[in-house]
Image (cartoon, helix red, strand yellow):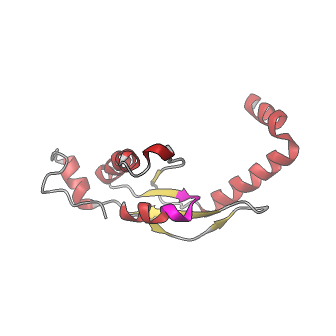
Amino acid sequence: MAALSRYASIFGLRGMQRAGAVQNAMHAAHPQPPHGYLPSVGTDRGLQGTGVGSALLGQQLADCDRLGQPAYLESSNVTHLPFYEKLGFRVTGEIRLPEGGPTLWPMWRDPDPVAGRAARQGAPRGSSERRPMR
């Protein structure tokens, strides 16, 4: 509760109302089935294209596969959708944020059962038992 009063003093009532509307829009679109949620993913511009983002996401997705759990994220940049699609995500809709906020694209990725089985059996990364990420 103390954090709420601090946020209000920083953002003001109008900012708090807008933040609440954004949270409500995102919550309404958030899927109900159990899943791994990747709420914030980003790579420094100087490191984009070097594999850092793929490596970070790859570890999280390997954990989801091992657990047999889907993954969910929202992308705020349409140009990043192909990157996530290469990792097996698919766009499930659009979230239009209130008051002229950006569009978000919710994305869902089903677990890879082959990779998950290999991870549970202790197969080393890159073994022939692992299927490449979609």
From the viewer's perspective, is 44 left or right of 53?
right
Closer to us: 74 or 20: 74
Question: Residue at image x 44%, y 66%?
Answer: 82
Q: Residue most toward the top?
A: 2
From the viewer's perspective, is 1 left or right of 132?
right
Q: Position of residue 106 (x, y in %)?
A: 54, 63
Q: Residue most toward the bottom?
A: 93
Q: Position of residue 38 (x, y in %)?
A: 49, 50
Q: Which residues are magenta?
A: 74-80
Q: Position of residue 57 (x, y in %)?
A: 39, 49
Q: Residue most toward the front?
A: 46
Report which quarter residue 21 is drawn in: bottom right
Q: Measured along the vertical axis of the image, is residue 84 above or below residue 58?
A: below
Q: Which quadrant, please, contains the C terminus? A: bottom left
Closer to us: 102 or 38: 102
Question: Residue at image x 82%, y 37%?
Answer: 8
Q: Which quadrant, please, contains the N terminus? A: top right
Report which quarter residue 89 is drawn in: bottom left
Q: Measured along the vertical axis of the image, is residue 85 above or below residue 61?
A: below
The answer to if 17 sits in the magenta stretch is no
Q: Position of residue 3 (x, y in %)?
A: 73, 31
The answer to if 79 sits in the magenta stretch is yes
